[in-house]
Amino acid sequence: MSLFEHNRPVGGPFEKPKDDVHRLGSMQQIKVPPPRFKDTDVIDFAIVGVGSAGGVLLQRLARAGFKVVGFEAGPFWDTERDWVSDETGSHKLYWNDLRITGGEHPLALGANNSGKGVGGGSVHWAAFVPRFHPSDFEVYTRDGVGADWPITYEDIEPYYDLLEQEIPVAGPAWYPWGKPHGHPYAPHPMGGVGDTLIEGCSKLGIRVSAGGPVAILSASHGDRPHCIYRGFCIQGCKVGAKASTLITHVPDALNNGAEIRDCCMVSRVSMDKDGRADGVFYFDAEGKERFQRARVVIVSGYALETPRLLLNSACPGHERGLANSSGTLGKYLMAQAGNVILGRFENLVRMYKAPPAHALTEEFYETDPKRDFARGFAVQTVGPLPIAFAKQMMASKGVWGWAMRRNMMDYNHWSALGLLGEILPWEDNRIELADGRDGRQDARDRFGLPVAQVTFSLKDNDKKMIEFGKNKVMEIMWAAGAGEVVQESRYAHLVGACRMSKTPDAGVCDKFGRTWDVPNLFVMDGSVMPTQGSANPGLTIQALAARTADYLISQHEAIFTSSRRDMTEPPCRKSLAPPGTFTRGIPHLR
Amino acid sequence: MAQDQHKESLPLTHPATGRPLPKREQPGYYPGFSTLKQKRYWDAATRKLIEERVSREKAIRFFTPEEARTMEAVVDRMLPQDDRIKERRVHILPEIDDRLYHDRLDGYRFEDMPPDQDAYRIGARAFEQMAQTLHGRAFHELTVREQEEILKSIHQAKPQAAQELWKQMNIERFWTLLLADVVTAYYAHPWAWDEVGFGGPAYPRGYMRLEEGEPEPWEVEEQRYEWDAPADTISDAEEMHAQGAGEHQVHSGQAGTH
């Protein structure tokens, strides 16, 4: 048989590991320890959801020596066994269970914006990690719309610095927007779509950041290899080059005694007679309902499942849902405008190569008094694979039949840029329970729990922003030399619905995610955001989680026993970062 | 369902000469390119998945035989493959059937839509009723042109018959659901990757020629040819520019792009 026989894998098959060993990327392996805690043990922290926020919290709290268990509704992946270089084969990475979506501009859910499995959405994010701008934290003060955050940019800045090293982030040495900063790893080489953005922006005199900031390795880092530019970022990175908390923080959490219960769906936060949470009810992998006692509960289930769990946890004294005395639980849900602008070029682009996320501009991020709307947008590269592109052709050009076949044969001639625009928080953009009450639908999951019913509508400011932003991206696409430009309306990311606030009447939790109503119940994930900027939320979610972990640790025993609310900012504990974080220099151009 | 029951349209033609073009083993502008020939460079999990996709026995378990007959004809027009030789056509309906049979959802349902399974059953009945009302024959017995006219009216959300059935759901969302399922099945197949010049799975090897649309050493250069869609079809002329329609568009729920 010839050496070049097609069926024989190059290098032979990968070694099959033992059952308790999970491969995380092509080099890293982690031995999953046997369960450490029993349901009857009183653990210190029960974390619901091991995603972007939950993964970081678990790692920090374990490293600080606490008894901590992370509950994850999806599986603990073995990336070599479970993940594939294939669009449809990656469907299982998403939260595919039923949700109801409506309103004037219904959001597509599922694959678009939520993950299921250890690592959560960070498993399938495109991994753009721009910071929020200082202005994002005071939108109401500056523009009279939206809301102010109860924190400032300076409060979160040390955590941006820290998480950019832990991830670590690849990007330019000088990032000019917001508060200028550098990145620890070098920017990535350009692909065809990045060249489109650079070409179009250069013609129009718009500054571009090329090669980042992205949470994708441009050089090897410990047991994680560098990017191989295969383009399957949002199908889960088998290489281990793209960061997810599964490979950046979960291994260190397990090494420090954390326990993860995967395929365990938390159904209810339990309350004791004194108005404190005393644990969580959950369905285990066999579908059996169990109860874990805990001294503090942190809900990190993202912007739909977090409010859903708190609503499903309604009980005497909390009839409208847990932590909902303000009436804001489930409200002020946000998604970003994510219109995709597609341009056809005479020359080939082959946009399946290189990460979808590799160049962007934030030149239009801030409020511009010359425009007729508040706040702004970013423009980013997008690299749809064939199925995603076919759906974009369907939505943007209305093609089917032979026209679909004809347009798809030109797949390699197309380039795609994405708008990422700030939609403001509105009270009636919301999540409720599909419990059949008050005219709502009645839909249940396999455990009999009402699912989330989402209502979303754009307001005047949002529509003006989208119109302006969409036209600006089309202008860039034309300037890059496209002979045909079309666009598809869509939305990206979900945040809000359990927002943090300065006062108990205006939100669900305080600036550390501690709910206003229940002293030992925390919310920490994208749902705490009062506004969202035009930056992808992943980095900010992880930075907020690291800060809350520092807060919990700095409170010592009081966090378990006292209802007193200490609002002192904690010190940023670099000592809790995973091993290998501080071995690289960061360019700090001033 | 045997392939030879599928209704054939007229052949593709050459625009300049009007001469019929022969059916191809591999349509598209990348002659000789084969992603499957690269499979020894793929990781084991991906190779197993794709090999199963190509070779799997195709069963219909969700649709009734009558529904399947109608929907096969619908799918043949939504994504026509008359330019392919019969042995190299992608089985689309069994993939949709499999999703519905196993209740694999995309994670959401619009509040003005029934569950996906109900939507398909309503749709199959409505297509059949439209064929009977308008032409007095079953949908699969209609001419290609007649079938396409019915589909076009659904695409435009203006059905000429079976209005009572279509009223049971948001007809634009049904079109999106159906076409999204159809293209998902077709463009998941390695033969479709070869057709559009997509490099396919690329782990652990990766790509190295990232710019200027350059092919990898194992990819091929584009070689375009001209073709006109069959004379008895209208779908190639159907291009409804949704550009600017913005708010009214029905979202496809595709995988997140950023």
Image (tube, coloured by chain):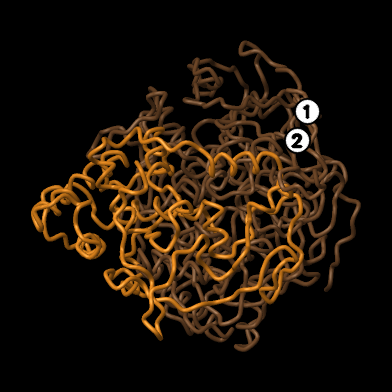
Chain colours: A brown, B orange
Please tell me which residue lies in front, B20 or A570: B20
Q: Position of residue A227 (x, y in %)?
A: 76, 56
Q: Position of residue B156 (x, y in %)?
A: 23, 65
Please tell me which residue lies in front, A289 or B95: B95
Cβ–Cβ under 8 Å for marks 1 and 2: yes
Please tell me which residue lies in front, A385 or A53: A385
Mark carried by residue A80: none
* Sequence-wise first label, 1 or 2: 1
**Which residue carries the number 1 mark?**
A17
Q: Mark 1 belongs to which amino acid? A: Pro
Residue at 34%, 66% in the rendered image: B247
Q: Position of residue B88 (x, y in %)?
A: 48, 53
Left or right relative to A560: residue A408: left
Neighbourhood count class around disc 1 (C-alpha, 10 Å): few under 14, some 14–19, many 20 upward: few
In the depicted structure, whether residue A391 falls above or below residue A239: below
**Which residue carries the number 2 mark?**
A23
